Amino acid sequence: MKCKVKKLDSRKFTDYIRAKGLKHSKKRRAIVKFFLKKDLHLSVDELYREIKETNPEIGYSTVYRTLKLLVDARLATERKFGDKSARFEPIHPEEHHDHLICIKCGRIIEFTNDQIEKLQQQVGRKYNFRIIRHKLELYGYCDKCRKKER
């Protein structure tokens, strides 16, 4: 289940690169467009394997460095779910979501829940604490993995 969000614009990345005086190559542009279009939680390895299918000239280090630049530009976030490798996810500033993570297959399900959002504000008020942001990660077994166990 994916959250409904506005599509991210790769022009923000171009503006960031220019402001930093960095080179904006065709390879970098292809990686950014591909990553933002996919709109998933991808590791460097996964993104590299997928983009190589359509752009075989793109190297692993270019994918890695471009993802790090996306994080620096605040267009992506680097997350580690449990003890898994780092995954990168596009940032949607107008929307917040949380994650369900399967500890067997690594599947990540995004969800939103108004009750959780209200509850965290209640907790903050109770302790006179102003919450700026939060991340909620719930670990367990997805439907498919539970069915395989039966």
Image (tube, rainbow, N blue to C red):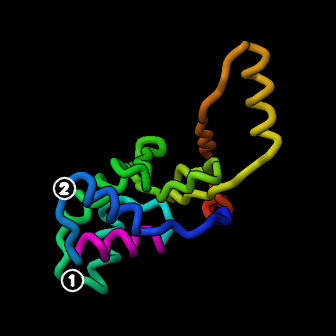
Q: Secondary structure at mark 2?
A: loop
Query: Number of callouts in the render?
Result: 2
Whether 117 is drawn above or below 23: the answer is above
Q: Secondary structure at mark 1?
A: loop
Looking at the picture, tell me which residue is in the foreground, 102 or 134. Answer: 134
Provide the residue designation for mark 1: 56
Query: In the image, residue 133 lies at what x, y percent?
Result: 60, 35
Q: Quadrant of the N terminus?
A: bottom right
The three-letter amino acid code for the residue at tag 2 is: Gly
Looking at the picture, tell me which residue is in the foreground, 133 or 87. Answer: 133
The residue positioned 72% from the left and 51% from the top of the image is 112
Q: Main secondary structure of the magenta part?
A: helix
Looking at the picture, tell me which residue is in the foreground, 150 or 9. Answer: 9
Position of 6 with respect to 85 (left or right) is right
Looking at marks 1 and 2 on the same chain, the residue that comes earlier in the sequence is marked by 2
The residue positioned 51% from the left and 59% from the top of the image is 105
Provide the residue designation for mark 2: 21
Query: In the image, residue 79 lies at what x, y percent?
Result: 44, 46
Question: Mark 1 or 2, which is nearer the eye?
Answer: 2
Query: In the image, residue 22 lies at what x, y percent?
Result: 18, 58
Q: Which residue is at the far bottom?
A: 54
| Rendering quarter of residue 21 | bottom left
Query: In the image, residue 143 lies at what x, y percent?
Result: 68, 62
Q: Which residues are magenta?
A: 27-37
The three-letter amino acid code for the residue at tag 1 is: Pro
